[in-house]
Image: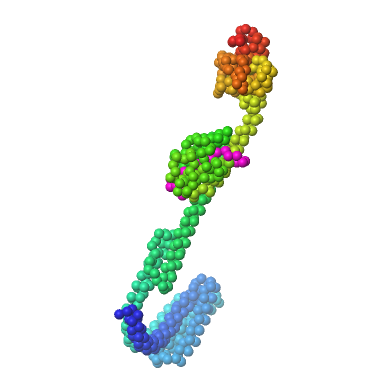
């Protein structure tokens, strides 16, 4: 039988049983009303008796406390209780005209008489106490007469209560019996009605409503704890339960999307914070090596799934060298020509990935996985390239490309600023013709030696190209500049890290040697002289002949101050030139042949 048919038959039977049980309930309600009236009457009589008994006891207690302590609050309490008692006397008189048995009326009059007698004694005692007769008042309230009157009043109240309770119990028993009979009939009919109704609704409510609601309740609790992995109901229903299930599905989908967006926002904020920290540290870098170290440190933090390199252009802008790396990049080498990168050719980021149907840079060895080349440009000049490679092709690179290009823009600007600063520093400290440190740098170096004067030896070498004017006259000024540049290069190679080489002015040079004793300084100076003398110098395919230099050396080991180093070295140089040139003369031999290491 179909559920709809069962529901219709159950509806007819339920209506009939409901009408029948309704009539039974009406009769039961009438009996209950009679029972209630009897109960209220009995309760009212008991309440009056209780209040009479309580008032008698409380009034006597207040009166006794007043005559014992003499406090007005007890007198006010006694007067209040007394007034309340008068009100109850009025109520008792009204009840006498009501429905009471003769025995109950007699008992009620007896209560009234006993209460008036007790009240008379207490009023007199209070009045005596107020008139100054404290002892008489206490005797009256604590004497046997007061005790007897109070006992008689309580006994009268008890007798009245017993009479009323007996009659009320009899009436209540009869009303209760009738009420229970009709109530049992009504309940039986109602139970049958409910049984029929619930038997039918069991299939509908439990299977179609209760079970789905219970399942949805568990789902909602888990969703409230933001557990969005919970499985929802799968049945496709077109009722209120189905609508609720659809609403829960929408809520779950929204929660999942919100979690995804929150996680993405946190990742995005973390990436931005890391980029900001990297930029702050790049701004404090002193050279390109420090900059490469900063990029290599932060790049794997910002892009943990990517590896790569930082390439910097050479001075000729023809090739790139890797100054820094992170992860394990292996698809691009340490150095390669700039022409091999399509990103540098196009001047924009280039993704080398064969799956994207685009050309692959020549410096990349694998064509199956994605590699991103981002040119580093600033002030209209390309200074390097930022290179990344991922493990799953171009997917990771595409997601990070916006941040990579943002970082590349700042790295390019930082590299350009460092290179510009280096160029400006060179312009301020180096001679543009020879590339050596200039006179300003020499003064700074000598000042440093004077400030840091200590037990370490220092030496100063003055060098002058012999007969330099003839190169300008015989071969032209360009040839003279070439000679000067070649001599400067030879001196730089010979001195290397042992000191600093400066162009003093014209064709004169100076070498500052810090931490070298006088013998080593003299030996190095003469090595420079011999290297220049033996070096073949050719300009535009034309030999320029032998080039010689005169050298003067001074040292601090003889105990004289640093401030006189240059002056003493210059004096030694003048002696070398006066002695025939192409010679090395030391200051500590006091000039002459003894100071000449070698004559040309």
Position of residue 296 relative to residue 30, above or below, is above
User: Is 590 covered by the magenta stretch?
Assistant: no
Q: Nearer the viewer, residue 250 or 143?
A: 250
Q: Which residues are magenta?
A: 378-395
Residue 472 in the image, given as x and y percentages of width and height? 68, 19
Tell me the quarter of the image containing the C terminus. top right
Tell me the quarter of the image containing the N terminus. bottom left
Colour logic: rainbow
The reply to whether residue 81 is in sight is yes
What residue sits 62% from the left and 7% below the top?
593
Position of residue 423 relative to residue 160, above or below, is above
Q: Nearer the viewer, residue 328 or 78?
A: 328
Residue 41 in the image, given as x and y percentages of width and height? 42, 86
What residue sits 60% from the left and 21% below the top?
541
Position of residue 216 relative to residue 305, above or below, is below
Relative horizontal placement of residue 437, taking residue 117 as reference (left or right):
right
Residue 453 in the image, given as x and y percentages of width and height? 61, 21
Relative horizontal placement of residue 404, taking residue 421 as reference (left or right):
left
Residue 206 in the image, given as x and y percentages of width and height? 35, 73
Q: Nearer the viewer, residue 186 or 576?
A: 576
What residue sits 65% from the left and 15% below the top?
466
Res. 390 image quadrant: top left
């Amino acid at each position: 039988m179909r559920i709809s048919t069962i529901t219709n038959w159950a509806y007819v039977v339920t209506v009939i049983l409901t009408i029948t049980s309704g009539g039974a309930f009406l009769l039961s309600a009438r009996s209950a009303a009679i029972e209630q009236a009897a109960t209220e009457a009995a309760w009212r009589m008991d309440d009056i008796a209780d209040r009479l008994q309580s008032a008698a006891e409380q009034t006597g207690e207040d009166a006794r406390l007043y005559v014992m302590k003499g406090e007005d609050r007890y007198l006010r309490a006694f007067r209040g209780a007394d007034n309340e008692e008068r009100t109850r006397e009025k109520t008792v008189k009204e009840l006498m005209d009501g429905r009471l048995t003769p025995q109950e009326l007699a008992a009620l009059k007896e209560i009234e008489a006993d209460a008036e007698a007790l009240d008379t004694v207490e009023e007199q005692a209070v009045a005596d106490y107020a008139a100054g007769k404290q002892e008489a008042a206490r005797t009256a309230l604590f004497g046997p007469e007061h005790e007897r009157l109070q006992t008689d009043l309580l006994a009268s109240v008890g007798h009245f209560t017993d009479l009323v309770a007996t009659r009320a119990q009899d009436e209540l028993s009869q009303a209760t019996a009738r009420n229970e009979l009709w109530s049992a009939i009504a309940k039986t009919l109602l139970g049958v009605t409910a049984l029929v109704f619930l038997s039918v609704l069991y299939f509908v409510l439990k299977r179609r409503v209760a079970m789905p609601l219970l399942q949805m309740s568990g789902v909602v609790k888990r969703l409230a704890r933001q557990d969005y992995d919970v499985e929802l109901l799968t049945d496709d229903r077109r009722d209120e339960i189905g609508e609720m299930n659809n609403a829960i599905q929408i809520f779950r989908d929204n929660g999942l999307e919100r979690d995804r967006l929150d996680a993405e926002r946190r990742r995005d904020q973390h990436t931005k914070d890391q980029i900001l920290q990297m930029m702050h540290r790049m701004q404090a870098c002193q050279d390109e090596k420090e900059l490469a170290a900063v990029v290599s440190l932060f790049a794997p933090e910002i892009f943990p799934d990517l590896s790569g390199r930082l390439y910097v252009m050479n001075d000729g802008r023809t090739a790139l060298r890797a100054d820094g790396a992170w992860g394990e990049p292996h698809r691009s080498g340490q150095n390669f020509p700039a022409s091999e990168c399509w990103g540098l050719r196009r001047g924009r980021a280039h993704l080398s990935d064969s799956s994207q149907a685009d050309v692959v840079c020549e410096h990349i060895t694998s064509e199956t996985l994605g590699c991103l080349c981002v040119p580093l440009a600033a002030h209209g000049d390309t200074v390097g390239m930022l290179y990344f490679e991922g493990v799953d092709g171009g997917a990771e690179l595409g997601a990070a490309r916006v941040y990579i290009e943002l970082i590349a823009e700042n790295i390019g600007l930082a590299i350009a600023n460092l290179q510009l600063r280096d160029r400006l520093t060179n312009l301020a400290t180096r001679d543009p013709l020879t590339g050596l440190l200039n006179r300003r740098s020499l003064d700074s170096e000598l000042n440093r030696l004077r400030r840091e004067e200590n037990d370490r030896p220092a030496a100063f070498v003055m060098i002058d190209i012999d007969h330099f004017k003839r190169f300008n006259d015989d071969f032209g000024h360009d040839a003279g500049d070439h000679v000067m540049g070649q001599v400067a290069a030879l001196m730089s190679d010979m001195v290397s890290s042992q000191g600093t080489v400066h162009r003093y002015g014209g064709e004169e040079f100076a070498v500052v040697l810090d931490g070298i004793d006088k013998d080593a300084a003299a030996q190095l100076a003469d090595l420079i002289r011999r290297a220049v003398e033996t070096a073949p110098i050719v300009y535009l395919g034309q030999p320029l002949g032998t080039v010689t230099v005169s050298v003067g050396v001074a040292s601090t080991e003889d105990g004289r101050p640093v401030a006189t180093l240059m002056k003493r070295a210059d004096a030694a140089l003048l002696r070398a030139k006066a002695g025939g040139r192409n010679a090395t003369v030391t200051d500590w031999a006091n000039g002459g042949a003894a100071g000449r290491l070698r004559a040309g």
